[in-house]
Amino acid sequence: MQALRAALLRFADDGTPLYERDGLVVFGPDADGRQVVRAVGAWSQLADRVAGLAVRHLPGRLIAPGFIDLHIHYPQTDVIGSPAEGLLPWLENYTFPHESRFDDPAYASEIAAVFLDELLRNGVTTALTFCTSHPQSVDAFMGAAQRRRLRMIGGKVLQDRHSPDGVRDDTVQSLIDTEALINRWHGTGRLGYAITPRFAPSCSEAQLRGAGELAAKYQDVWIQSHVAENRDEVRWARELFPQARSYLDVYRGFGLLRERAIYAHCIHFDDEDRALMRDTGAAAAVSPTSNLFLGSGFFDFEGAQRVGFQHGLASDVGGGTSFNPFHTMLAAYYAGREGHTKPGVSLTPSRLWWLHTAGAARALGLEGVVGNLQPGCEADCVVIDLQATPLLGRRVSQARSLEELLFALIVLGDDRATEQVWVDGRAAT
């Protein structure tokens, strides 16, 4: 059993933040041997229960759930920070040439290790991850995640058209490979598989149909793709799939909208699209640093909340500009505030934090498993140094409420604030 004592953040079922200035969380095995939260709450109420147990006292620190990244591309680790005029030129000039190198298992393993270590360095303990069209890219990612005992989800990209040599796959073989990878990795340890059409324009109807058949056959696997990221892409999808009501409706037509389906961006939506997301149980991975970097637009938080479909936060590295959840939350705050192209809203700091932890877990269908520190949740957490920089320490010392404390971290925090990360009940960094 492991016990940590410090300021403590977790969330109630309705998303309300629960905060202890002097809290305690105890990790230990459950009846199945999983490392989970065995006890959590105020130190004053739990001290007698942990008598005789070595408690790590961490003054000046905040214990919080490990962050969840709802959409990220591990093969684009070295693409981050590449200049481009927009999404499609960026794909053609940087992303596709780089991803073509992942047919080499040694290279894929090298990048997978760097990628996962960078996630951990920034406090991210679960991510929904694109691999490349090469099956060996999935094997490299899953193997590296398994060795680190991480709860990770990933999948082989499907893209059998409108893609260059080196990343374009064969329709039939891509579906055979996908099913083999599901059987090899899904449910192995803490790993999960996601059926991964890159985006509708990169997939033939036969490939999308096959992906939908696999999604129906394997109901507990995830689905991930992109939709309505920028207007050029939306126009292209309309030309390629004229029978669909909207870009999102393309995926519905092939059986790719359901619970555990996560679609990145979801910017250029109308209320019918939002209702379709709500009614099918699909969720949006909001990727604000990527949207700002590529000039794609702004996610409509007001529309999502008004219609009531699930959404959470994502870095979208390498279009996204940072692995760091503080940077993502701050960019989401900016995107929410923008009120010229959509209604502007001010997301509270605790809401931003929830969207990157417990809310993201709910979007994945993993509520009560990861993204929180309630009893029974898996034992993943981040220990944040509230004095990591002089300015952060000064601002935090003046915080009059939890919301001010969390917002100071969102605005001023970076990887230096991530002092330690716990994975599966053990210190990983």
Image: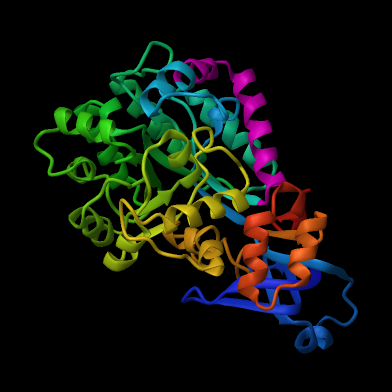
Q: Main secondary structure of the magenta part?
A: helix
Q: Nearer the viewer, residue 384 or 83?
A: 83
Q: Is residue 120 magenta?
A: yes
Q: Nearer the viewer, residue 140 or 67?
A: 67
The residue at 49%/19% (across/down) is 94
Please state the horizontal and vertical placement of residue 162, each as a whole percent of the image.
29, 19
- Identify whether 251 is placed above or below 325: above
* Residue range corresponding to the magenta coloring: 96-123
Please state the horizontal and vertical placement of residue 135, each as a whole percent of the image.
48, 25
Quarter occupied by the N terminus? bottom right
Please state the horizontal and vertical placement of residue 339, each as a whole percent of the image.
36, 57
Q: Is residue 240 magenta?
A: no
- Identify whether 141 is placed above or below 23: above
Q: Nearer the viewer, residue 2 or 127?
A: 127
Q: Is residue 327 visible?
A: yes
- Please state if 94 lies on the left or on the right of 26 as rendered: left
Q: How many marks?
A: 0
Please state the horizontal and vertical placement of residue 411, each as a whole percent of the image.
63, 56
- Identify whether 61 is placed above or below 76: below
Q: Is residue 30 visible?
A: no
- Please state if 276 lies on the left or on the right of 423 as rendered: left
